[in-house]
Every structure is written in structure tokens, then in C-alpha cells.
Image: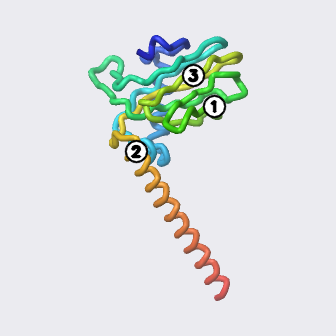
Amino acid sequence: MSARAKYNMQVGADHPVARELANMILGALENNLHFVSAALPFKIFPPLFNRYEAGQSFGNHIDSATRQVSGTFDRVRTDVSATLFLASPGQYDGGELLIEDTYGVHKVKLPAVDLILYPAGSLHQVTPVTSGVRLASSFWIQSIVRGDGARTLLFDLDTAIQQTGRDVFESSCRAATQQATII
């Protein structure tokens, strides 16, 4: 249904350059502990690449519950939506990603190579680009934890555990340095 709200250009998923870029993104995400902690990925739908020029937009929509990987029988449940910004905010006007949740509408326009994750069931849109070109990659994640609330709780716990580990390490380093100074 989201196709009816879509007014942008997209590179074909089977294009060799799109496949190469998608593999680069997936490889980088695999090694990004913050992403893994936030999304808890089980499967990732291959990234798609889109371009918005002046007057183009993507109206209000909710992402499909599943996506079929091109050329396969493989389906990915879309628990988490991801937008990777590929153009810096100064390269285009308009083109904000608006995500609506229980706390209101959030306007997102991030620096190039920054990524936002949000629940795939969120109502969202890309506002019309008024000048320049907005480039982005969109993809979806099937998480090992389906519920947004449970995923958020696990992310918060993991973040707290990692911070505690850093605090303990820094405290140990300070104690060792003080002890070395006394000797």
C-alpha cells in the first residue's frame, strides 16, 4: 500500500552497484555493536537506495508487515525500519523524515552516514524536497525480539551494562595510576 504514497526514484535491487553498496552497509552494520544492540537483528532485508529531487516526497504510510527478497522465496518480517542518510542536510531543503508515535511527530534530518531505526509499524513520511537532492538507503530488520517495548528495554539494559563496564574500567585505571604514583 505504501507504493501509492511513493514519489521518488529508486535503484533496482538487482543492479550490481546497489548490491555492492548493500553488502558494504550490511558488513558495517554487522560490526556495529550499537546497531546490533538496538535492532537485535535476525534477518535484514537488503538495503534499497532512493533519490528525491525537488517536488518529490513519500506520503504518510506504514511499512509492509513482510518483504520478499527479490529473486528468492525468503521473506523478512519488518519489525524495525531503518533509514541511512546518504546526503548531508545542507545538500537539500525539505525532505525530512517525519515519524509519528505515541509521543507525537518527530522530524529527522541527519548528517550523511547517520542511521535512524524506528518501529516499522510507525506512521511516517518524507516531506517534499524543495531544492537539491536527498539520497538515502532504506531497509528493514526482522529482530530476534518482535516487540518494540521489549527491544527498547533490552537496549536500555545493554547500554547500562556497557556504561557500567566502562566506568569500572576507568575507575580501575585511575586506581592503578594513583598506586603507581605513590610507589
Q: Which residue is mark 1?
A: 109
Residue 99 seen in the figure: yes
Residue under the point 51% across and 20% down: 60
- What residue is shown at x 44% (from left), y 18% (from top)? 13
The single residue placed furthest to the left in the displayed view is 73
- Looking at the image, residue 71 sits to the left or right of residue 165; the answer is left
> Which residue is more in the foreground, 125 or 177?
125
Q: From what the image shows, is residue 46 above or below residue 116?
A: above
Q: Amino acid at mark 1?
A: Lys
Q: Nearer the viewer, mark 3 or mark 2?
A: 2
The percent coordinates of residue 32 (x first, y second) are 49, 45
Q: Count the numbered circles shown.
A: 3
Work out how far the residue at label 1 is from the one at label 3, CA to CA, in angstroms: 10 Å
- Is 183 displayed left or right of 1 in the figure? right
Q: Which mark is residue 149?
A: 2
Label 1 close to label 3 by CB (< 8 Å): no
The answer for how far apart the CA atoms under marks 1 and 2 are is: 24 Å
Foreground residue among 145 and 73: 145
Horizontal and vertical percent for residue 8? 55, 13
Q: Could you tell me residue 59's position as x and y percent?
A: 53, 17
The residue to which callout 3 is attached is: 126
Ranked by sequence position, the earlier of labels 3 and 2 is 3
